[in-house]
Amino acid sequence: RLLTNTPSSLRRCMELLNPVVDERLRKEELMGKNWPGKPCDMISWLIDVSSPEDRNVRSIALRILVLNFASLHTSAQGFAHALFNLALYPQFQEPLREEVKAVIGQHGWTRESMSLLPKMDSFLKESQRVSSTSLLPVVRKAMEEIIFSDGTKIPSGTHIAVASGPMHFDSRYFPNAYEFDPFRFCSTRKEALTKYSMNLSHISFGQGKRKCPGQFFASTMMTTMMAYLVLNYDMKLENDGVRPPDEWFLMNCVPNRTAEILFRRRPTC
Ligand code: HEM
C-alpha cells in the first residue's frame, strides 16, 4: 500500500482535471489571460507559468501530483504527531484553549485569527522539533566540488544531508532540548517569528533558498484544525502518559497508525 501505481494515479488525476483544465484553456483563448471570474488557485497558477508545450492536462496533473506528494503526508503526519503530543501533555490544552477562545471571540474564524495565536504556533513548532517527520529533511547532491572555510571538501557528485535530530536535540540551540517546552518559541509574537524563522537549527521545513514553500499553508491548516479541537474537545491517550511508539519508514518518523486518542466533547462555549 506504500507504493502506489504511478501510471494509474496519473490517469485518474487526468480524468478528474481534464474538464477543469479544458474549460480554463478555452476561456483564456476566448477572453484573454485575465478572463472574468478566473479562479485564483493552484490550477490557474500552474497554467499561467506553463510554457506553450506544457499547457495540457498531463503536465498540469503531473505537477499537481508532485505537490500532493510534498504536501499531504507531511501535513498529516506533522498534525498527528502534534495531536499525540497534546494528548500526552493534557495540561497544555487549557492555555491553548484560552488563547483560541480570546482570539476567536474577538475576530471570528478567519485566516488572520490563525496568525494571532502565538502559543498555538509555538506548540506546533515545538512538536515539529521533537517529532520531526523526517530525519533528513534537507538532502542535496554536490554538482561541483565544494570546499568549506574549515577545509572540509565535498567532492562533486556526493550526496549530503542535514540531519534534524542532532540539531533539534542540541541544548546549545534549544535550551533543555530534551524537555517538551510548548511555549519556548513564544515570548511575543514578533520575537517568536524572528526566533523561529531566523533559527537555522530548526529545520523541519528545510532552510535557505529551497525552504518549503508550503510552510505557511501547512502552519495555517494545522493551527486551524488544532484550534478547533482544543476549543471543542478534551483529549487524552489510551494509556495516560504513554506516547504510542512511532513507526519508522527509512528516514521518516511516522506517527503510530493504530493508536487511539480519546476525545470528550466540551460544553459549547
Ligand atoms: C508540515 C508540513 C510540511 C513539512 C514538514 C514540509 C517540509 C518540507 C521540506 C523539509 C522540504 C525540503 C526543503 C529542502 O530541500 O531544503 C519541503 C519542500 C517542499 N514542500 Fe513542503 N512541507 C510541508 C508541507 C507542504 C505543503 C502543504 C506544500 C504545498 C501546498 C508543500 C510543498 C513543498 C514543495 C513544492 C517543496 C519543494 C520546494 C523546492 O524544491 O524548491 N509542503 N517541504
Image: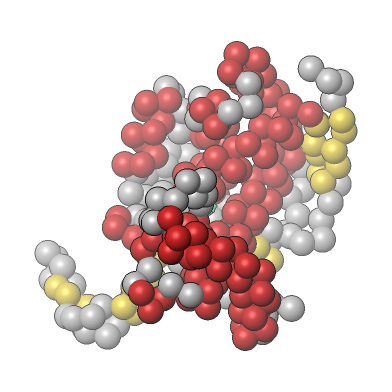
Residue 241, located in which quarter of the rendered image? top right
Q: Residue at x 64, y 45 (%)?
A: 82
The percent position of residue 100, horizontal first and vertical second, equals 64, 23
Type of colouring: secondary structure
Q: Residue at x 36, y 35 (%)?
A: 195
Report whether residue 40 is seen.
Answer: no
Q: Residue at x 68, y 58 (%)?
A: 255
Residue 267 versus residue 176: which sits nearer the camera? 267
The C terminus - image quarter: top right
The percent position of residue 46, horizontal first and vertical second, equals 44, 62
Numbered disc total: 0
The percent position of residue 24, horizontal first and vertical second, equals 52, 61
The percent position of residue 149, horizontal first and vertical second, equals 12, 64
Residue 223 versus residue 179: which sits nearer the camera? 223
Relative to residue 131, is residue 149 drawn left or right?
A: left
Report whether residue 71 is seen.
Answer: yes
Relative to residue 229, is residue 198 drawn left or right?
A: left
Q: Residue at x 62, y 83 (%)?
A: 6
Residue 180 versus residue 208: which sits nearer the camera? 208
Relative to residue 90, is residue 196 drawn left or right?
A: left
The N terminus - image quarter: bottom right
Please tell me whether residue 195 is drawn above or below residue 190 in the rendered image: below
Please tell me whether residue 72 is drawn above or below residue 219 in the rendered image: below
